[in-house]
Image: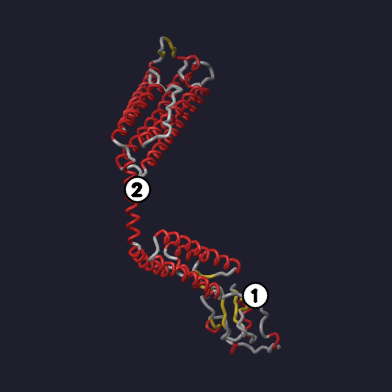
Amino acid sequence: MREWHYHSTEGKQVGPYPETEFISFFVNGQLRPETLVWTEGLAQWTPANEIEGLVPNLSQQPRLAVLPAHSRAPQARRPVMAPIYLYKPFTASVLAFFFTPLLGACLISSNWKKLREPKQAFRSMLFFYVYLGFLLASFILPPSYLISGILFLNLIGLWLNAYCQSKFLWKKQIHYVREPIGTSVLYGIVILWIIIPLSYYSQKDHFDQAFAEMKVVMNEAQKQRLTPTDLEKLKQLASEDITKLDSETTDSDGFSKKTDLQFELIKSPKNKAEEMTNVLRSRFNDIINISNEYVTGLERIGWESLMDPQRIQTPNSYQQTEKIIASGINLATENKRKQIASYERCISAIEKLAGTGLDQEAKTKTDKNMKLLIDASDIEIEIAGKIGELVKHLHECSERWEFKDEAYFFDEETDEEKFTSIYSEFEAMSEKQDELNELLEEVMKSD
């Protein structure tokens, strides 16, 4: 049921009343048909006789006894405000920040006037004139004053617009209808189109000087780039480091091994070549540390014992095998994650060192290297899984084979065929892994 409010003869807003009770006020003569009334959903205060069904047809109603004078007007309950159309303070502050505080000040001042707060409206317009004066003065001031002044006044405008008015509305518990903001956005764009060209042409000399100074700085930075001599020295050091890395981190069979090798960083690098050398050596140290962690992890879970014939043929060892395989795959997956993260840190350091970022050719190379790294890591995980398949097959036929002279001899041909098939896949993966590792080394040397 709707609830109604009315304007008393003294101009006060009274209500709310349930609709049935409100209609009785007109029947008893307590309210007149032309009384201004309002309920939720009405855009404005409206005469009661213009609202269908609110004022009954008194000519068809039996006349009622006239109430005493002191009881004719219904007792006032609580005053309410008519629906007010306001610009949302936060929206106005956003417009002020991205367009101009001039626009925000006008919108907020309009809100204050509708809220019958003339002092607050004057304060907002005072800010408008201060900011306008600053803009006019900025046409003859250096750009540094213009930028700092705009930021400072924007912060003040944000406080005046969003904070003060929002706090007032919240404190007074004023509910309002949001005013459409589209026209104001259009005005903001027009203001920008006027202010920006005026600001630029009035400060053209300052901007030209700033651009000239920037050009000098860029030329100085250009001088700090790698010279051909520095570049050759960098390539030589990187090639030597990569060769050392490969020889110290793999055994004669090409398997990873633990090493105490450390690449010393150049202290107080004198040029970008030495800084780049430090970036690469940090990456190589990461490779060694991650590789050592991987080898240590495999030793911890007993990976070397996975293919041990005696262990496989031990009763109830299958559960242990499954645990070792799962742990090995998890270690290989974690090794991949760490390697990728290390490579990304290296690329970020190179981009920071370059200052302007990587060019398209460098980005293409880094993407290619990342793909190689991911492929090499993925095949490491696949190899761990393939070894797991071999061991599980040996478990399945543990009583139908024997291990002698470093080879497996099966009693049944089908068991041997399956073992050979899985082992062939394992060897193919191992060959592909060797190729990827060699390619990675060549790419690192050439890049």
Residue 409 seen in the current view:
no
Here the colouring is secondary structure
The residue positioned 54% from the left and 19% from the top of the image is 316
Callout 1 amino acid: Arg
Find residue 176 and report its horizontal and vertical position in percent.
54, 70
Image-quadrant location for residue 223:
top left
Q: Is residue 140 visible?
A: yes
The residue where tag 2 is placed is 217
Seen in the picture, residue 145 relative to 328 is either above or below; the reply is: below
Q: Is residue 73 left or right of residue 298?
A: right
Residue occupying the point 59% across, 72% down: 1
Q: Compare marks 1 and 2 and give the one earlier in the sequence.
A: 1
Tell me the element at label 2.
helix
Residue depicted at x 47% and y 29% = 331
Label disc, if present, on residue 78 of the rendered structure: 1
**Residue 422: image tag:** none
Foreground residue among 69 and 317: 69
In this view, the residue in front, 355 or 293, is: 355
**Whether label 1 touches label 2, CB < 8 Å:** no
Image vertical order of residue 38 relative to residue 232, above or below: below
Residue closest to the eye, 284 or 337: 284
